[in-house]
Image (spheres, rainbow, N blue to C red):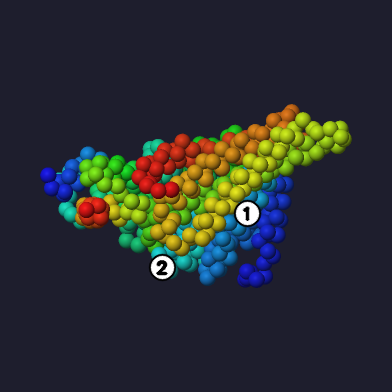
Amino acid sequence: MTTATALEPVEVRARVAAEVAAAHADDVDRTARFPAESMAALAEARLLGSSVPVELGGEGLALAVLVGIAAMLGAACSSTGMIFAMHHSQVLSLTRHLGGSPALAALASRIAREQLVLASATTEIGIGGDVRSSTCHVDRQGDRVHLVKHAPVISYGDSADLVLVTARRDADAAPGDQVLLACDSDQVALEPRGTWDTLGLRGTSSRGYLLTADVPADRLIPAPYEEISSETMLPVSHALWAGVWLGMARAAVDTARRYVQSAARKAIGTTPPGAPALVALVAKLDALELQVMDAARTWDALRDDREALGRIGFMVRMNNLKVTASEAVADIVAGALRITGISGFRNDGEHSVARLFRDAQGAALMVHNDRITAQTAQLLLVQKRS
Amino acid sequence: MTDDDRIRTVLQAHAKLRVPAAGLADGDDLYAAGMTSHASVNVMLALEDAFDVEFPDELLTKHTFCTIATVRAALQSLTEAAA
């Protein structure tokens, strides 16, 4: 068994995985396929179970460290970065809310030991995109739980070892009275509905499915989903997504910088036309980095303070992180495209930012910024002090 | 109108409950009765208007708006503090 002490430093392992991701990023994008090579590299580097607590066999990595890895992966392959982000949001949503259940603790240990890939089925057809309400419900029959869910999106559902599914607590529960069910891939049938042929983030394979689950009742996470969502799933996914976007923005700025430098070499003594715009772009990138890393560190500092995680000010901040970081990445990549011009516009060549540009458009749309802003507006109706 | 009547009037108008607010017992879980977090915001705003109080941030928890009894207790703590 591999122990944490036998492992290379996280940075080193993440860099190896990011190199694999970079090598396959264009093919993953072109053929819209799951980035199997980079996910295998992440498993090999023991980075898929790394957020599981140490006592359950993981490394208990801080969110700030996971965000750093997400940024490295995002710079290499946006789809790999997003899958890493979604995966660890699910791992933490499970491992932080075990509720003393031996079955769930055993499952958490298995995630670390076997480097399992976790996906999520939180959206449902007919609820208008609101993940905090469900139509489907779990149906307990003895020591088993049954569930049928029409999921418009389960990212990388075909490639996941575990799927965390939301549903109403029982047939009589209100739409917002949800629970989270952890299903092994051999306990759920996923019948594909539709395809995933998109502008960007093409490797996340975010297809729809008709999900039918038949799992042992002890796979029901005891905590209400509302608690899991506000304390873990929302803030962690917003921070990890923002980390991926930070990496994508960095990659675009690096490309723009290389382009400006190559122009400078061809006309030594003159300032290349793109150089002043590059200055502004670097400033935007720095601001994004500060915002993302500070939010991650704040969550790390509060991670065991449930009262603080539930404060309105913190929820507003983590919601705004998603909205502003997603706008920033699109803005920064567009800025890099203006600097690199036709070279950046090309799909090939060393100064292409085409794939990043397309991928960056997804950031504002995946859990639409308008929806998040509407929720934040509600919070500001009740908040009394900043 | 008693405080309880006013609370029930607010709940009837804004909580989007699946049952009439008049039929709720003191300790019935309002969320289980169908109140969403979105509706609870409107309930809070309406209570602030009806009782001329402001719920401070530390009272803005799920627990405060969980039952008629917890709402009444929160309102009493606010009106006593103001008196």
- At a point 52% along the width and 44% down the height, the residue shown is A322
Residue located beneath label 1 in the image? A68
- At a point 44% along the width and 56% down the height, the residue shown is A309
Q: A212 left or right of A241? A: left
Q: A287 left or right of A145? A: right
- Judge the density around disc 2: few (<14), some (14-19), many (≥20) Cα neighbours within 10 Å: few
* Viewer can see residue A1: yes
- N-terminal of the pair, mark 1 or mark 2, is 1
Q: A290 left or right of A302? A: right
Q: Which mark's residue is nearer the viewer, 1 or 2? A: 1
A167 shown above or below A329: below
B31 and B48: which is toward the camera: B48
A65 shown above or below A198: below
Residue at disc 1, secondary structure: helix
- Identified by mark 2, the residue type is Gly
Rendering coords of residue A139 (x, y %): 33, 53
Residue located beneath label 2 in the image? A100
Where's the N terminus of chain B, which quadrant? Answer: top left
- At a point 52% along the width and 56% down the height, the residue shown is A298
A185 and A230: which is toward the camera: A230
Rendering coords of residue A319 (x, y %): 47, 45
Q: Give the chain of mark 2.
A: A
Q: B11 left or right of A100? A: left
Q: Which mark is residue A54?
A: none
What is the distance, in whole Å, between disc 1 and disc 2 at their CAs?
Answer: 30 Å
- Taking the view exactly as shown, the residue that stands out farthest to the top is A342
